[in-house]
Amino acid sequence: MVAHRRPVIDIFNYYIKNGFEAYREIPLGYEYFDSILEKSKEWPAIVAKAPSNDVIGFAYLHPYSNIETFKRTAKVTYFIHPEHTRKGVGKGFLEELVLRARRFGVDNLLAHISSLNEASLNFHLKNGFQECGRFKKIGRKLGRDFDIIWVQRRLS
């Protein structure tokens, strides 16, 4: 996955600059990729490629917590190049992550989503996640307040 450093960070930075899918406001340097690798260390990580072999998205599982009693719960993260959204890439990522999560003994998937990212919220709700918590107006980006919505999908 190290070979995908630049395209992964470029996709992530697109969402930092242009929307509410990523919470940060300042684009990240390519070294941030190392923290993604560290966060998902020993956990499944996937890239999707177009027929041209260009990276069009990335996804990974990472622990909800490093505390042993939460080892059956993982967080999902995925970002897809904007030209390739709504084409089944996200669903493919999620299906693969569910399969790999089960192999890891994970039976709870969590995601946190900006309330201003309706597409992601709708995607998760359509794919078996349920809202399980909301922190109201804890973020502010591009001059707008937003909630963080937590969603959960039980795999068992």
Image: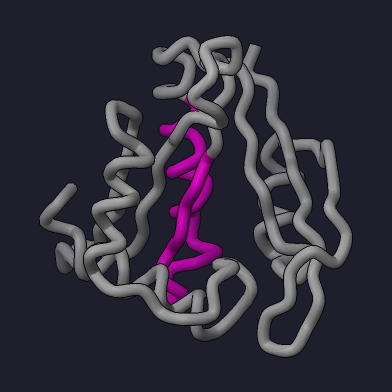
* Residue that lies at the very extreme toward the right in this rendered image: 136
* Residue that lies at the very extreme toward the left in this rendered image: 3
Q: Which quadrant is the C terminus positioned in?
A: top right
Q: Quadrant of residue 64?
A: top right
Q: Is residue 85 magenta?
A: yes
Residue at (75% x, 44% y) in the render: 150
Q: Is residue 68 magenta?
A: no
Q: Seen in the image, is 33 located left or right of residue 2? A: right
x then y, percent, for residue 111: 63, 43
x then y, percent, for residue 11: 37, 71
Asked if residue 66 is positioned above or below residue 85 in the image, the reply reads above
Please state the extent of the stretch shown in magenta in the rendering.
Answer: 76-98
Asked if residue 129 is positioned above or below residue 15 in the image, the reply reads above
x then y, percent, for residue 107: 59, 16
Which sits in the foreground, 148 or 97?
Answer: 148
Residue at (64% x, 73% y) in the render: 20
